[in-house]
Image (tube, rainbow, N blue to C red):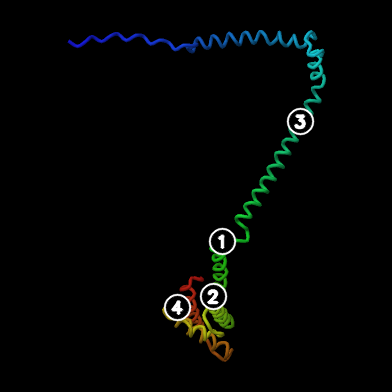
Amino acid sequence: MPPKDKKEKPKEKPAGWSFDIVEGLVILLFILAIVGSLIPAIFRLFTSGDLTFFGYRISGIYDFFKNNIQFFKTLGFVIAGAAAIGTFTLTKKADAVWRAEKAKLFPEDMKDPSSDTEVAKSKLQERWEKVVANSESTNSSDWRLAIIEADIMLDELLEKLQLPGDTMGEKLKAVEKSDFNTIDNAWEAHKFRNMIAHEGQNFMVNQREIRRIISLYETVFKEFAII
């Protein structure tokens, strides 16, 4: 037969004070009632003139503050204003120190290279749009300007590629075709520009041919992503 379970002994309350919620509220109300009854008595004691501290009447201190309440209000406003100004000044100084330290770590003159690239590309795009606009003009002089400006942009591209040579012809001859897929277009467009420059108004052009030459320049510029 299994042994019968013994009845568990009731757990003893831990030593020390322990209250439930109701008891705690009753004690709190009792304490508040005592404090509430003592405050008026303490106030009367301080203002009666019977209480002294090292020979000084405590009521005199109370009367002093009571009679000069306006002065202390003004003084409080002045102190609060001075604290606000001081806080603002210290914040500005701390901000200046932080900016100075940041400038040492991240100088403003060190610009993001990608940002410079975007700006340069935007300017080239504006120049190219002007070239296209001139090629679409009804004035033949604008057509010639479009070709000349496009060739200037081509020369600048060759300079950036750091090709050897003093003239555009020499730079184009130095190109490796595997590195410059549109080299034939660049040659044809540049030769057309030379004919315009050398023969001037004697070289007869039509808008259809101008547009074709401009499209050759465009293929070169798009290969190198400058427009």
CB atoms at circles 4 and 3 under 8 Å apart? no
Pair 3/1: label in front: 1
What label sits on residue 160 in the rendered view?
A: 2
Q: Is residue 209 above or below residue 222?
A: below
Tell me the residue that label 3 is attached to. 77
- Specify the farthest residue to the left: 1
* Distance Cα–Cα, label 4 vs label 1: 28 Å
Question: Residue visible at 73% across and 39% down?
Answer: 86
Observer-nearest residue: 42 or 221? 42
Q: Residues within 10 Å of mark 1 (few under 14, many from 20)?
A: few
Asked whether residue 77 appears in the rendered view, the answer is yes
Question: Residue visible at 66% across and 52% down?
Answer: 100
Pair 4/1: label in front: 1
Pair 2/3: label in front: 2
Asked whether residue 137 appears in the rendered view, the answer is no
Tell me the residue that label 4 is attached to. 180
Q: Is residue 187 above or below residue 102?
A: below
Q: Is residue 71 left or right of residue 201?
A: right
CB atoms at circles 4 and 1 under 8 Å apart? no
Q: Residues within 10 Å of mark 2 (few under 14, many from 20)?
A: few
